[in-house]
Amino acid sequence: MHRKFFIFSTAICLSAVFLSSSFGAEWLIKGARARAMGGAQVAIASGIQATYWNPAILALHRSEGFELEILGADVGVDAVITGGLEEDIKALMDVINSIGSLNDLQSRFESLSITQQDIQNVNKLIDIFSSFDENSEKAFQAQAYASALDIRLGRFALSSQVTVLGSMRPIVDRFSNNILNSNGTFGSSAQDLFGIPTANFGTPSTPAGQQLAAELDLLGGRLLSTEQANALVAAAEQAGVNVSDPLFQETLKSVVSNTANQTSTGTLNLNKTGVEVYGLTLVEVRGSAAMAIVPSRLAIGGNVRILQGLTFRRFVSLQEVNKLDALPQQIREDLADQRKETVQFTLDLSAILDLGILRVGAIGKNLIPVFFKAKNSPGYELKPQFRLGAALFLLDKMLTLAVDIDVLPNDVENIPKLDAQMLAFGAEFAPINNAFLYVALRAGVYKNLIESEQDEVWSVGVGLGIGPLMLDVAFAADRGAIENGDFSLDYTKDPKDIPTRLGLSATLTLQFTF
């Protein structure tokens, strides 16, 4: 079972990271310095990285010589699991492993030859299905980026970036394709449940269970006896299901009603539960320019961006759990049929005000909304984003404190109830900063103000410069992972020990002044 779970989880996560996306997504943290400082960069970004965070900074302070900066490489990835999705995947895999296959289970239901464990497993499946209601915040998201050979000449810059935005949205078939027996029977007699004596299950032990059994008895009519209704709910209680959960009750009632009425919705082995993997890969060329309004005090800047978007969509059904080894290859083959390419352009505008010890900045991105067509879906839109930042420079600029906030929520279109509005804090201490050597220690934290159940994310990083060469690295993780001290993505362990958010970045640059 562990091997199957590992393959399934890895296939889904890799497909989300490298192929897929949800859009109108949260603000991408680009650059290792930014990652280390929690994403607080609108007021303090420097050099080529300022073209992403606030291009106006390019004109704020210019050296007396001619500046040439080359970004050798900048890579990063950020992944997040929300709503306890990792626990549901683990529970689902445990049930599927116990069942064997949905086709085999359906055959046992049809022939009235199931086991008591089968009944419990079906209740567990129904419980898992019911947790994915239409307002579910359960999701997997990932953002990855890469830049190389970007160049800046003073207050002008030309840069490129490949960004991959990823999401996985559960699609649950709760009210169709859930008939337990196509003959409309729940047993060969009123005293057995699909071939098992009802006495083996007993009766519900909780008031909620007793009430639910009475309601099922009415729904099932003459085809479901009181003893069978009691046995079905008792089996759910024995499986550890919370039978008082309204969503579980609603789903179980649908199963009983469809089975009793032989509703033409399809049997359980035809259930369409699965995950929808969405994808958007952006290849971007960005031209940046800035102008000082008040020298060394106030500047404005902007970007003209040309984007080529590659969209992707793939549904992974529950049945494919039994064909996990072939799933990655199927996804790769689907890329040719499911992807759609679109070329668009948009604008960014920004401003920066430097008051010495205090600096304030603002930026608006995607000011011309960008829409990318997709096959078999409405398409994806990158909506305008607005962010404010402020910073304090202390101890003769040896210590920098910064804060950023998203002005408006950045909604995620393909995942209901999952929005992002980040508040970020960062600190940088640079005890050595001269023409030959630069050393900086950084730390930060950010919090999603909308999704209060998400842990805050803490980050650390270092910057090391020797002459014209600068290397920055950073790491970020959610509070739970830090408290556990476990950052591995071992999907065979307890889901509660799996990090819900991880981020990594590394940046290498060269800067010359002539």
Image (cartoon, rainbow, N blue to C red):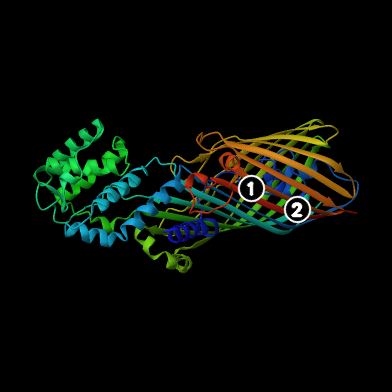
Q: Position of residue 87 (x, y in %)?
A: 44, 46
In the image, 79 versus 101, the foreground residue is 101
* Mark 2 secondary-structure assignment: strand
Q: Position of residue 214 (x, y in %)?
A: 17, 35
* Mark 1 secondary-structure assignment: strand
Q: Position of residue 493 (x, y in %)?
A: 49, 51
Q: Is residue 443 left or right of residue 138?
A: right
Residue at point 47% right, 55% down? 278
Can residue 404 be seen?
yes
Residue 504, compared with residue 248, is above or below; it is below
Q: Quadrant where the C terminus lies?
A: bottom right
Q: Which residue is mark 1?
A: 347
Q: Separation of disc 1 and disc 2 at Cα?
A: 15 Å
Which amino acid, by three-letter code, is at mark 1?
Leu
Q: Which residue is mark 2?
A: 157
Can residue 373 be seen?
no
Residue 130, compared with residue 180, is above or below; it is above
Which amino acid, by three-letter code, is at mark 2?
Ala
In the image, 472 versus 186, the foreground residue is 186
Q: Give residue 386's quadrant in the image.
A: top right
- Give the mark, 1 or 2, whose residue is nearer the N terminus: 2
Q: Position of residue 267 (x, y in %)?
A: 23, 56
Q: Is residue 343 left or right of residue 290?
A: left
Residue at point 48% right, 48% down? 494
Tag 1–tag 2 contact (CB < 8 Å): no
Could you classify mark 1 by the number of other residues whose Cα lies within 10 Å: few (under 14), some (14-19), or many (20 or more)?
some
Residue at point 76% right, 39% down? 428
Could you classify mark 2 by the number of other residues whose Cα lies within 10 Å: few (under 14), some (14-19), or many (20 or more)?
many
Q: Check residue 336 in the rendering and tell me which mark sits there, or answer none.
A: none
Q: Quadrant where the N terminus lies?
A: bottom left
Q: Give residue 130's quadrant in the image.
A: top left
